Amino acid sequence: MTTIDEHIATFGDEPGYLDFARVGPPGSGVKNEQYAQFELLTRGRFGTVDRLDGQDERVRTAVAAVTGLASEQVVFQPNTSSGLMHTMFGLTGGVAMSQAEFPSLTFAATRAAEALGVLGTTWIATDHGRVTPGNLREQLTSSVTAVAVSLVDFRTGYLVDLEGIRQVIGDRLLIVDAIQGFGVVDAPYAVADVVASGGQKWARAGWGTGFLALSDRAAEALTPVFSGFTATDVPGTPLDEVPPPTRGVRAFSITHADPIAEARFATALEEIAAVGVPAINSALADRVNSIIDLADEFGIPVVSPRDEAERAGIVVIEPPADQLTVLTASLFNHGVSSTTRQGRVRLSPHVSTDSQTFDMLRASFTSYTSAIKV
């Protein structure tokens, strides 16, 4: 096992970075893995390609270790959106989701409905941006065969109650876009039928990494519309024929994955598994508390959840509309990385967020409050 301090020591992000909900800077392990694997490729040494092919099993095992799912339920994807596109194009019936979900979900459902005509979308109303078991129960109809949610909402920072939603929706498929919590939330992934995530945010594996995991029920229900030559039961590469897709999650593969991306993702997940998601979540909760405390100290409204059971790593603050520009300018001038969208500022730390970052955030809040009092 790795201690949380040893895990933190592997990262080198500079002070002021509070934008992990956008992208998480990789640590030394991922960087070294990238260099090592690419060095092997550049030399073309005997056996190199065969060794790179072995990264597929490695990354699926790593995903399984973090999620608690079986490696046989996992297929590598280059990003969350690809996994969700596979899902929605393979789905028949009706899917319910909030129109405020991140576009990876809404675009996949809409494009699939427009292209194939076998999927209907029910847009559900939320409780101030939150999908809860209670408000979902009231809006389900007999035509809804699947429900899609984000593990953590990208706008509000709300951590969804997966187990509660599972109880409410019954035997409908539960589809989860996990990217805003994967790697920092110890979620009950086993209650979901579909889990899709990328590795570039909280997992800190860089772009081009992700996975799709399917329950046996989902693998049976979904049609592998985009199923390539790597997804058949023919040994090796099928030549001079086009055999049918294999059964199971492996059918949702199009071509050979980037083995170096798989190696990066596997390394990041192996490091997460070594320290444990609960330990990461606990350390992250302390950083989130510190941001909330600073916002409260300076009278900046916090509109994301305060209860640790309803949040992950995102803090959303909402100044008066006429003061937003002043706040964002103050953050920029003090070197604090954040995301501003629709009148709100999203601050997202990680376990490597240090005291100097909080000093910079305090300085930016000080400048902001001084400016609005002038």
Image: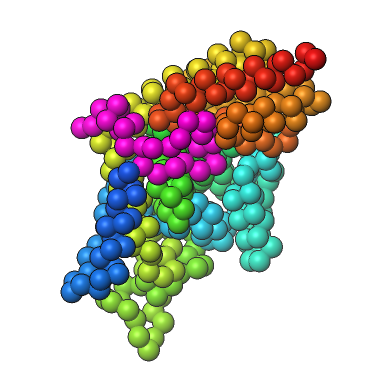
Quarter of the figure with the N terminus: top left
Q: Residue at x 47, y 65 (%)?
A: 224
Q: Residue furthest top?
A: 297
Q: Residue at x 41, y 82 (%)?
A: 242
Near-viewer residue (358 or 149): 358
Residue 227 position (above or below residue 94): below
11 inside magenta stretch: yes
x%, y% of residue 265?
36, 50
Q: Main secondary structure of the magenta part?
A: loop
Left of 50 or right of it: where is 142?
right
Residue 178 position (above or below residue 290): below
x%, y% of residue 64?
31, 45
Left of 373 or right of it: where is 248?
left
156 inside magenta stretch: no
Q: Residue at x 62, y 61 (%)?
A: 112
Near-viewer residue (127 or 186): 186
Stretch of the chain drawn in magenta: 1-27
x%, y% of residue 130?
62, 30
Near-viewer residue (148 or 54): 54
Quarter of the figure with the C terminus: top right
Near-viewer residue (146 or 235): 235
Q: Residue at x 28, y 77 (%)?
A: 236
x%, y% of residue 99?
69, 43
Q: Residue furthest bottom?
A: 240
